[in-house]
Amino acid sequence: QDAGTEPGAGVVVGETKQSLYILTDQHVVHSLNGNNCQNPTARFLLRNGAEKEVPFTITSAFNQQLDIAAITVSRTHLKGFPLRLTFNLARDPTTLKRGDHLFIIGYINGQKRLFVPPEPFFFADINNVPSIGDVLQYGPAVNPFPGASGGPLCNSDGEIVGIILEKGNDVGRALPITKALEVFKSWSLPKPRMFAERRFR
C-alpha cells in the first residue's frame, strides 16, 4: 500500500526463479493506479516477528468482473530475508457446511501487522451473483474490515477456501479459491510453481 491508497492483503500462490505471484483484489490494485501510487509496497511477516517491506509490480493480469488481480514481488528484494514458502492448503469450499467456523486474515484498519478477528465468522451459503457467479457468503457481515480485501478466507483447519471480496458496504463475500486459481492459471503469466496444494475432489 502507499499513503492515500486503500490497504489490502493478498495470498502468495506461486513462484518462479525470479518472482513471487500474489493474488489480491482488483479494486485494491485499481486504488493504487487511481491514486498515482509511485511506490507500492508489500509487507512480509514471519512467525518469529521478522518482517520486510518490499516494492511490488502490478501485472496486466486481472479480472475486473471477478475483482481479482495478480501482483509480483522480485526475489532480489527478498535477499537476506529468511522466507521459505511451503504450501498453502486450499480446500474446495463446497465441502463447507452451514455454520462452519471461518477466519479472515488482513491488513485491518491500517495496522502494521496482519490481523485475525478474535471471533470466528461462520459459513452461510454459496450464492450465485449474476455479475460474478458463485460466491461464498459468510457472516455475521455487520462490520466491514477495511484492509481485508484480497486476503484469505480460511476454515478452522487453516485451509484457504476463498479470496475475500471486501468493497465498500459489500461485505461478507469471498471468491471461491477453486475459481480464483482457475482464473490465475488462465492468465498469460510465466508458468509458476504453485503454492496452493489443491486438496480438491
Image: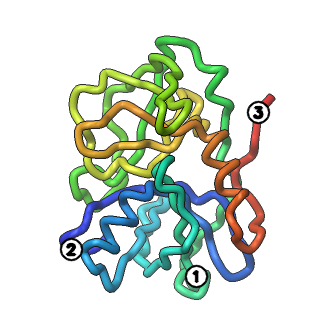
**Rendering coords of residue 154 (x, y %):** 52, 35
Q: In this image, 109 relative to 70: left or right?
A: left
* Mark 1 to mark 2 CA distance (whole Å): 22 Å
Question: For the residue marked with disc 3, what is the amino acid?
Answer: Phe
Kind of element beneath mark 1: strand
- Please provide percent x and percent y for residue 126: 53, 22
Separation of marks 3 and 1 at Cα, in angstroms: 30 Å
Image point (61%, 67%), residue name: 21
Quadrant for the N terminus, please. bottom left
Rendered view: 130 above or below 191: above
Which label number is shown at residue 3?
A: 2
Q: Earlier in the sequence, mark 3 or mark 1?
A: 1
Residue 47 image point, x, y percent: 48, 56
Question: Residue at 33% of width from left, 54% of height from top?
Answer: 107
Q: In the depicted view, which residue is nearer to us: 6 or 47?
A: 6
Q: Residue furthest left?
A: 4
Residue 184 drawn above or below residue 199: below
**Which of the 4 quarters of the picture holds residue 94?**
top right
The residue closer to the viewer here, 46 or 189, is 189
Locate residue 124: give its quadrant: top left
Q: Which mark is residue 201?
A: none
Q: Where is residue 125 drawn, in percent x and y?
A: 49, 18
Give the mark, 3 or 2, whose residue is nearer the N terminus.
2
Residue 200 or 64: which is nearer the viewer?
Answer: 64
Q: Would you name the residue on which mark 3 appears? A: 200
The residue lying at 61 percent from left, 47 percent from top is 180
Report the residue marked by disc 1. Answer: 74
Mark 1: which amino acid? Ser
Q: Amino acid at mark 2?
A: Ala
